[in-house]
Image (cartoon, coloured by chain):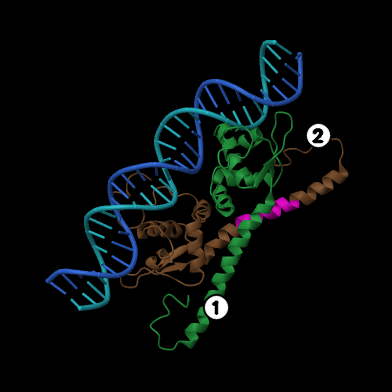
Chain colours: A green, B brown, C cyan, D blue
Amino acid sequence: MFSTDRLNSNRKERTIVSADPLSQVFSALADPTRRDMVARLTLADATVSELAEPYEMSIQAVSKHLRVLEDAGLVSRSRDAQRRPVHLEADVFDLMTKWIERYRRQAEERYSRLDGVLRWMPDKPNTRTGEET
Amino acid sequence: MFSTDRLNSNRKERTIVSADPLSQVFSALADPTRRDMVARLTLADATVSELAEPYEMSIQAVSKHLRVLEDAGLVSRSRDAQRRPVHLEADVFDLMTKWIERYRRQAEERYSRLDGVLRWMPDKPNTRTGEET
DNA sequence: GTGGTGTTCAACCGAACGGTTGACAAAGCA
DNA sequence: TGCTTTGTCAACCGTTCGGTTGAACACCAC
């Protein structure tokens, strides 16, 4: 909660502030390299160097990308000797899906409601900002 | 591709490079303020100052946020005297939804396939990197 | 032990981000 | 004709981001 991390350091828990989960997931997937890794991980687990192979960047860069995927909960890592197999955690997708679907539905509802309003149309100026209490 | 923008500047088209559409949408929604704006816009169109009202930041900051939403195609703006009513373009949600659903499905398929493999289990090492040609 | 392999850590760098302030344009209102 | 409202543009500032290099750690194989 305060220092605790970055002193004993090495293990996890150097979260510091960490954005809300939804922001983390969205921003993790905002990078094409990271999206590509996720896509490949839907086919099979892979080690860091296997994941790094197709890209031109250094292994360290890939390792960093994996960290943000892990922090976002999209990916988990186990241990196999020196190797760190990466595994996709598809559940987190739901977080996004739910957010998106919720507001999409709300938007659609609103549009159909608006159709109604337009048909009704008394003499108000133009329903500009709508009926938001 | 080179200068061209930022010289004639003022009108649109200062795209410079502009990330791929999917990255733009994801990263636009990676900010909680922007997500909140989108959420509110599902209820009704709104002007810039109406949108800005609940937040502590300056109008200019809100204007910037709207720009990234607009560049991502999530939002469009019309004109009403000095006002610039903002309207949600819910279609772009589909871009994300499709990406997410595609890989979620792929991941699920893989897991069920893996169940099969485990039951079958010959003597191969472990199907590590799978069958990605 | 020594050496190789796989991965992470630490420091650094330039570009992008999220915010600020100040100036200004464009339209309505006195 | 001013003055106000609404919004954008431009410049700046500190922080984060995506990448680099170099060093270190952890583990296996001689």
Disc 1 designates what residue? A112
Q: Is residue A27 visible?
A: yes
Image quadrant containing the C terminus of chain B: top right
Residue at image location 60% in from the left, 35% down from the top: A63
User: Within 10 angstroms of label 2, few (less than 14), some, or many (20 or more) residues?
Assistant: few
Report the side of A108 relative to A80 (left or right): left
Q: Main secondary structure of the magenta part?
A: helix
Segment tinted magenta in the rendering:
B98-109
The disc labelled 2 sits on which kind of residue?
Answer: Pro
Task: Label 1: state its secondary structure.
Answer: helix
Between marks 2 and 1, how big is the CA–CA gap? 57 Å
Residue at x-position 45% and y-position 71%: B45
Closer to the camera in the image, A89 or B24? A89
Q: Provide the chain ID for the residue under circle 1.
A: A
Q: Would you place residue D22 above or below residue B92 in this image?
A: above
Q: Check residue B125 in the rendering and tell me which mark sits there, or answer none.
A: 2
